[in-house]
Amino acid sequence: KTYYTYLQTHDITRDTSYNDEKQIDFDVSRTFSNDDSNSKYKKQKLKRILMTYTKRNASIGYVQGFNFIVSKLMSYIDNEEYIFWILVMIIEHILPINYFSELAGVMADVDLLLIITQQLYHINLQPELGDNAYNYLKNILFQWYSTLFTVGFNNETVDVIWDMLFLEKGI
């Protein structure tokens, strides 16, 4: 019996486990197209991986966006346990320790990208765009970072970004 199998069968005792499972169920249902003949199998596999991760790392639990990260990994790798351990490596070793914990790292990267863009183009985006458009832009950037760019980009672009993630240990 592997550690992954043990975690899958281990009871969750955290108070937030029900909320995590509820959110995972919601996100899994919208991750894969129902037109796909393997959709049901993929959704079950995705849910098992995500639930197992929430058991492994209670301090982070489930974060929206993990479903897209895991589904991208599933497009490369079939072995469920390998996918789980790659997710662990990304969240706990490649990205900064607080990246997904309360989304501090994600928000810092969004702010940093906005600062760099404004300095590079000598523009103050918030007054130029207005509050609504600026907040909309921040939400788009937040989605990119929280899903590790798996949403909103084609596969080739994601592959290049993920090469940087794995080879350079950062984006």
Image: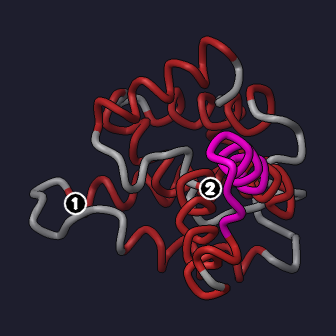
Which picture quadrant has residue 132?
A: bottom right
Residue 76 in percent (x, y) is at: 34, 28
The amino acid type of the residue labelled 2 equals Ser
Around disc 2, counting alpha carbons within 10 Å, would you say few (fewer than 14), some (14 to 19), or many (20 or more)?
many
- Look at 37% across and 74% down and name the residue there: 29
Q: Main secondary structure of the magenta part?
A: helix
Q: Nearer the viewer, residue 134 or 165?
A: 134
User: Relative to residue 87, is residue 68 drawn left or right?
Assistant: left
Can residue 53 be seen in the rendering of this structure?
no
Based on the picture, tell me whether residue 123 belongs to the magenta stretch: yes
Going by the picture, which residue comes out furthest to the bottom? 132
Can you identify the residue that label 1 sits on?
39
Q: Secondary structure at mark 2?
A: helix
The numbered dot on residue 85 is none
Q: Which residues are magenta?
A: 110-125
Q: Position of residue 114 (x, y in %)?
A: 70, 54
Q: Is residue 41 left or right of residue 1?
A: left
Q: Nearer the viewer, mark 2 or mark 1?
A: 2
**Residue at 82% across, 57% down:** 60
Q: Are marks 2 and 1 in contact (CB under 8 Å)?
A: no
Q: Residue placed at 64% from the left, 78% from the top?
A: 135
Residue 88 left/right relative to 46:
right
* Nearer the observer, 18 or 3: 18
Q: Which mark is residue 146?
A: 2
Residue 165 image position (x, y, % from top left): 60, 25
> Would you place residue 45 above or below residue 129 in this image?
above
Whether 24 is among the magenta residues is no
- Secondary structure of the residue carrying numbered label 1: helix
Between 55 and 23, the one nearer to me in the picture: 23
Q: Earlier in the sequence, mark 2 or mark 1?
A: 1
